[in-house]
């Protein structure tokens, strides 16, 4: 079963396209977990307990695990999410020369981190992504038009053909999609560009970050981010990280209230997105 088939099943089961970003900034962890062994894992476990019924997937960003015992926290997190039946998209934005790319891609195999999908950077070209693309059962989300203010610096450059670079990236990613495992990353902060990219690639699911803390357009994220797959389920993901996992920061009424707030935030985002599905 391909990643997108598994994702379609999960979307149907929980009636949700919410991707919950697991970006446990050490400086923002609540006191009750900050002092525990493996704080990031303790935090994520509680977040998963509180949100899994609304999560189509979890998206841990590797940046938050690349020190000390971070990878152990990440391994535990991925295994726990799988135990709840939720796929995991590792946000690592990889892309490097062949032998290095092969090593990076091994994180997707069991024995490595066993993530179900990964984000990759297309800047170094096809061979830098080949080891990911070859793993037919794993999803590969190619950065296309990112949500950050500087995303336009290079991605919007106009080519001789008149098309912006991000549209060429979308078209090229379509060519790389021989195994049906390619998705695109397109931020919710640029709704017109989301629409333009959807016109270029009608069938590729998007990961749309940037709703929540970055203030992106939830309606456009759903309208253009989901692709009509043959199973009859529109597949795609709309991610929020800080807006969900730190929703309890204002709760100040102890551990239970803190994580309940994260659950509420995930549920609210699910409902908001479902209005447009
Ligand atoms: O690849 C990504 O997920 C990504 C691409 C992009 O264009 N913008 C973007 O914000 N992201 C990631 O999505 C998450 C957004 O987090 P919040 O702004 O807290 O919802 C972070 O992990 C970002 O690294």
Image (spheres, helix red, strand yellow):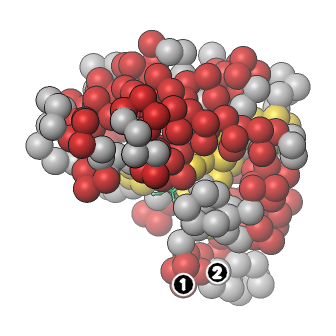
From where the camera sits, is residue 226 visible? yes
CB atoms of marks 2 and 1 within 8 Å: yes
Residue at (83, 28) in percent of width and height: 233
Quarter of the rendering containing residue 263: top right
- For this rendering, which residue is in front, 181 or 256? 256
From where the camera sits, is residue 133 visible? no
Q: In this view, does 164 lie to the left or right of 200?
A: left
Q: Is mark 1 on a helix, strand or loop?
A: helix
Quarter of the picture containing the C terminus is top right
Residue 179 in the image: x percent, y percent? 63, 33
Q: Is residue 70 left or right of residue 86?
A: left
Quarter of the rendering containing residue 200: bottom right
Q: In this view, does 227 lie above or below 142?
A: above
Residue under label 1, please give it: 153
Residue 39 in the image: x percent, y percent? 22, 36
Residue under label 2, please give it: 156
Q: Which mark is residue 115?
A: none
Q: What element carries label 2?
A: loop
Residue 207 in the image: x percent, y percent? 63, 48
Q: In this view, does 111 lie to the left or right of 220?
A: left
Q: In this view, does 136 lie above or below 29?
A: above
Residue at (29, 24) in percent of width and height: 76
Residue at (63, 16) in percent of width and height: 1
Q: Is residue 72 above or below residue 219?
A: above
Number of other residues with Cα within 10 Å of mark 1, as a class: few under 14, some 14 to 19, many 20 or more: few
Number of other residues with Cα within 10 Å of mark 2, as a class: few under 14, some 14 to 19, many 20 or more: some
Residue at (68, 85) in percent of width and height: 158
């Amino acid at each position: 079963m391909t990643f997108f088939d598994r994702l379609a099943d999960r979307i149907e089961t929980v009636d949700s396209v919410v991707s919950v970003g697991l970006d446990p900034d050490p400086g923002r962890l609540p006191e009750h977990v900050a002092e525990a062994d493996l704080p990031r894992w303790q935090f994520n476990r509680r977040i998963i307990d509180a949100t899994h019924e609304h999560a189509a997937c979890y998206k841990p960003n590797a940046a938050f695990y690349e020190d000390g015992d971070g990878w152990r926290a990440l391994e535990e997190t991925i295994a726990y999410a799988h135990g709840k039946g939720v796929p995991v998209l590792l946000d690592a934005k990889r892309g490097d020369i062949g032998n290095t790319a092969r090593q990076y891609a091994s994180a997707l195999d069991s024995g490595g981190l066993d993530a179900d999908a990964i984000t990759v950077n297309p800047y170094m070209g096809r061979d830098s992504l080949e080891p990911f693309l070859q793993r037919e059962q794993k999803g590969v989300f190619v950065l296309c038009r990112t949500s950050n203010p500087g995303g336009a610096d290079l991605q919007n450059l106009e080519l001789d053909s008149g098309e912006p670079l991000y549209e060429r990236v979308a078209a090229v990613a379509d060519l790389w999609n021989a195994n049906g495992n390619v998705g695109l990353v397109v931020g919710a902060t640029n709704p017109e560009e989301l629409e333009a990219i959807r016109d270029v690639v009608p069938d590729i699911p998007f990961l749309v970050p940037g709703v929540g803390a970055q203030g992106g357009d939830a309606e456009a994220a759903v309208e253009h981010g989901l692709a009509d797959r043959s199973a009859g389920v529109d597949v795609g993901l709309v991610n929020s990280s800080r807006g969900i996992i730190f929703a309890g920061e204002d709760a100040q009424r102890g551990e239970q209230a803190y994580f309940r707030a994260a659950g509420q935030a995930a549920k609210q985002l699910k409902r908001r997105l479902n209005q447009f599905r």
